[in-house]
Amino acid sequence: MSDLVERLGSDARRGVVATYIAGNTLATIGVLLVLVLMVLALAGPLLVPHDPLEQSFLSASQGPSAESWFGTDSFGRDVFSRVLLGTRASLAIGVMAPLLAALFGTWGGMLAGYFGGWTDRLLSRFSDLLMSFPSLLVGVMIAAALGPGFRTAIIAIAIALFPRFVRLARAATQVVRREPFIDASIASGRGPFAIMARHVLPNIAGPLIVALSLWIATAIRLEAALSFLGLGTQPPAPSWGNMIREGMGDLVGDPWPAAFAGAAITVAVLAFNMVGDALRDLLDPELET
Amino acid sequence: MSGYILRRGLEVIPTVLLVLTLVFLALRILPGDPAIAALGEYATPEAIATFRQKLGLDQPLWMQYISFVRHALIGDFGVSMTNGTSINALLLDSLPYTIELALAATLIGIVIGVPLGAWSAVRRNRAPDILGRLFALAGFSLPDFYVGVLLLIVFSLHLDWFPMLGGGEGLLDTLRHLVLPAVTLGLVMAAFVMRLTRTSLLEVLRRDYVRTARGKGVPERWVVFKHALRNALIPVTTGMGIYLLTTLSGTITVELVFSRPGLGQLLIGGITARDYTMVQAGLVVFAFFVVLVNLLTDLLCAAIDPRITLR
């Protein structure tokens, strides 16, 4: 009997340790990948082996070789250089859109949670409505209104992510609102906006930052989808999504540009997903995975 | 229950009106004259005036709005700005392709996702679970249209098992054209369904009644399938509405990959050609499906789970 208990105990322990290490290995890989991506995004133009915009019809649609590692596209442009430079557009939108959504969403959520009543009903109703639509569809709607482009992609993705931050900030604000130090602050004559900025925001920032990191992966995926549909980053500037779009034109003759650009999207989304998951596990160990 | 259905049904009215208003306004904040967009920069003033009159663009904004809402509510979307064909006819042609794809993908997602999630939960932290979780991670990280491109390269270009492009004619050909797009979206959906099933089943397996069932000697197979899985599938069923909508929006990109002449192609084509009436119609129809699926999901939830209070 004691033998059985011991075996169970060690098995369970091994399980916990294994999960722990597995989680951490994934997290470590994720963090390293994210760092590499950031360096590539910042230093991309210095690192590219060829001019990503230079066309050469003599060397068009060639597969991978020693000269161009990922081959060339149908305009003869170096795919490796384009994928590398595409990191910039994808990461810029992938980080800026959630930041914008977090900024407006946090204030929206704080207003709703702090004032309650009609402000709350209006803001909550609006975010519920927005959230009942799939993000890509919201993105397409916004792009239809603003016309295709880099800026449109940022605004569209920010609007699609906005309600998630409203919800989160609202719930957290409702909890903080009941704390005695808020009442004390009101009694001392501070206005509601000053209270929100000074007392509410610092107390709800933690979960919002985690949410921000989790939505970067989604934002990168949305940017790729919008650019693939021709609504995001516009050619000739390379972005992973529009490279797949261009690659679709000659998939029979040269599938490499589309294949490599898609692989880049996958790696980036995977990396940010791994980091986001690790952050969430770290801050919420109770959560069953 | 009937009171709940009525109330939930009435809630749809303000939502629909708000969506119609947003669509109407969204397309009017765009700089530039739709008449010039449709006719080109060198159109004569007379041609532009005629065009504007024909489409009612010369009327005040509020009259355009009322006319738009009235027509949208009875499902009359007018004619395309760029080629003058009836939009309703175009919608009727394209809708089956999109609906077939979304439903087939959902079916594939459930058929793969539920067993995989259950297997993964029962064999927690062992090989099936690790494989299952890798599958889910891949499903969350691979964009659906890229999965489509890869399937297209392998199964159409190299193996030549499935036709490459289009929607197909006749039953058999249509099905053959449906396989790859449906598998594309189905695999991505399966990842979501798998993870939800796994989490939910793990949760249920820890409950007291499961322990009681095990304690009184019920075989493990029965405990899992009869006692646990049935309850674990409630959140999976209610989550299906969200998956169906994600899949519906996924059809937009996947239709482009496989050149399926569906609703997404119509909408994106309209945006590219700056065909306002077409974009309006496409957005309204997509929004209609979103509202409908959300309504049905809520009603389904209330019907299958008696613990949900009908407020």
Image: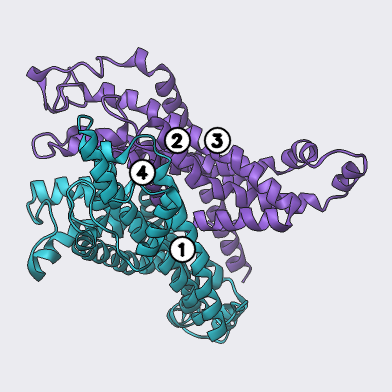
Chain colours: A purple, B cyan
Q: Give, as a three-letter code, the residue at label 1.
A: Val
Q: Nearer the viewer, mark 3 or mark 1?
A: 1
Pointer 4 or 3: first along the chain: 3
Q: Nearer the viewer, mark 3 or mark 2?
A: 2
Pointer 3 or 2: first along the chain: 3
Q: Which quadrant of the figure has residue B85?
A: bottom left
Secondary element at tag 1: helix
Question: Which residue is under mark 1?
Answer: B16
Residue at the (46%, 79%) spot, across then down: B230
* B13 to A289, vertically: above or below: below
Q: Are marks 3 and 2 in contact (CB under 8 Å)?
A: no
**Tag on residue A144?**
4
Foreground residue, A15 or B6? B6
Residue at the (45%, 35%) spot, across then down: A154
Secondary element at tag 3: helix
Pointer 2 or 4: first along the chain: 4
Q: Give, as a three-letter code, the residue at label 3.
A: Leu
Question: Which residue is under mark 3?
Answer: A99
Cα gap from disc 4 to disc 1, whole angstroms: 19 Å
Residue at the (39%, 64%) spot, across then down: B70
Query: In which quadrant will I find the N terminus of chain A?
Result: bottom right
**Residue B211 horizontal side relative to residue A132, left or right:** right
* B58 to A9, vertically: above or below: above
Secondary element at tag 4: helix
* B263 to B311, vertically: above or below: above
Question: Which residue is under mark 2?
Answer: A154
